[in-house]
Image (cartoon, rainbow, N blue to C red):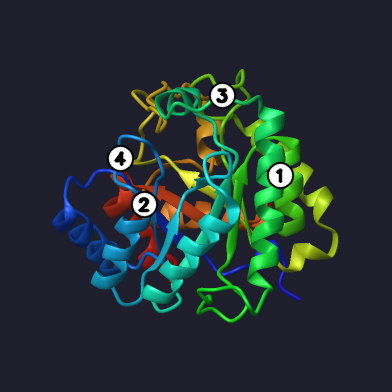
Amino acid sequence: MTTIHERDFRFTVCVFSPADRDGWIHKARRAEQLGYDVMAVSDHLGAFAPVPTIAVVAEATERLRLAIYVSSSTLYQPRVLARDYATLDQYSGGRIEIGLGAGYSRAEFENAGLPWRPAGERVTLLERATAEFRQVLGDPEFRPRFVQPSGPPVVIAGRGDRVLRLAARHADVIGFSGSAPVPDGDPLRLADMAEIRDRVAFVEAQLGERIHQVQFGIPVHRVLPPGTRTGITDVWQNDVTFSPDELAEHPSILIGTPAENADKLRALRAKFGFSYFNVMESEMDSFAEIIALLR
C-alpha cells in the first residue's frame, strides 16, 4: 500500500491579489497553464468573498481543482457551508476541495463584530464542523448533491495538538500550517525545523493504518535564486534568519535552481511525507519550473 512517503506530488497555488473579475480569470487560467493541480482562494474580511470567486474561476477553467484555504468553522454554520460547497461542486463539475480550520486572526473577528473565542472553543467548533461535514458527505439525502461520489477531499489545517489529532482522524489532506507557536491571536511567524519535525512526528503517531490514506501538505512561502541568504521574509513579512543548514532543509523556503529544488522536494517527501505543496501567489511562476521537473 502507498504511504505518505510515496504519494504523487500535488501543487496548489493560493491566490490573493486580483482586483476584479478579469484578474481572477487571468490568474486561474495562468495557474492551469502552468500545471498547478489546485487554485485556492483565501477567506479573509477585506478580500473578495471566496464562494462567488470560485464560481467565476470554475467557469473560466477546465481541469483546475478549486479550494477555499481555509473556511473558519467559527464563522460559519457547518451545514450552511456544506450547502455552499455542494453548490460549487455542482457548478465546477466536481472539482472542489473542502478546506477547514479553526480561525486564527483576532482582528478579523473584531472587524466582523464577533466575539473572539479562546483557542479551545474554536477547536471544539472545528471538531463539530468536521463531524457534520463527514455526516453530510455520507448522506444520500443531502441537497444539493455533491458531484464527487464520496464527496470532495477534506483538508484540515493547523498546528496545535487537537487540530492535528482531528486531522489525523478525518482529513484526506493534513495541512501543516508551518507556523511557530505564538500567543493566541498574535501575528503568525514561520516555524523552525525543530517545530516542523515535532508536528510531523506527532501526526504520524496518531495515524495508525490511516497513514496509507492521507497526504501531508505544507505551504511554500518563497522560491529564491541560488545563494540567497539575506533579506528573506515569510508570507507574514517577518524576517527569516535561519542558519544555512536549516534553510537548506526547510520546506517553506526554497533556494536554488529548479533542479535543486525538485530534488529537495523529493527529499522532503521521503523524509517527512510532504507531497502536497501550497505555493504562495507571489511564487507561482518561479515554482512552476519545479512542477515541470517533478511531473
Depth check, mark 4 against mark 3: the one in front is 3
Query: Which badge, 1 or 4, comes first in the chain's sequence?
Result: 4
Going 52% across and 56% down the picture, which residue do you hit? 80
- Secondary structure beneath dot 3 equals loop
Calculate the distance from the C-alpha at mark 3 to the C-alpha at mark 1: 22 Å
Residue 237: % across, % down:
37, 25
Q: Earlier in the sequence, mark 2 or mark 1?
A: 2
Name which residue type carries label 2. Pro
Residue bearing mark 3? 116
Q: Amino acid type of disc 4?
A: Ala
**In the picture shown, does residue 275 fall above or below 48?**
below
Secondary structure at numbered mark 1: helix
Residue bearing mark 4 = 47
- Residue that mark 1 sits on: 164
Horizontal placement of 24 versus 46: left or right? left
Dot 3 or dot 1, earlier in sequence: 3
CA gap between label 1 and label 4 equals: 27 Å
Mark 2 lies on a secondary structure that is helix
Q: Residue at x 26, y 64 (%)?
A: 56
Please tell me which residue lies in front, 123 or 215: 123
Give the foreground label among 2 and 1.
2
Q: Nearer the viewer, mark 1 or mark 4?
A: 4
Q: Residues within 10 Å of mark 3 (few under 14, many from 20)?
A: some
- At label 1, which amino acid type do we have? Leu
Instruction: Tell me the distance, in whole angstroms, between the alpha carbons under discs 2 and 4.
Output: 8 Å
For label 4, count other residues whose C-alpha is less than 10 Å away and answer few (under 14), some (14-19) or many (20+).
Answer: few
Whether residue 167 is visible to the viewer of this picture, yes or no, is yes
According to the picture, the residue beneath numbered tag 2 turns out to be 50
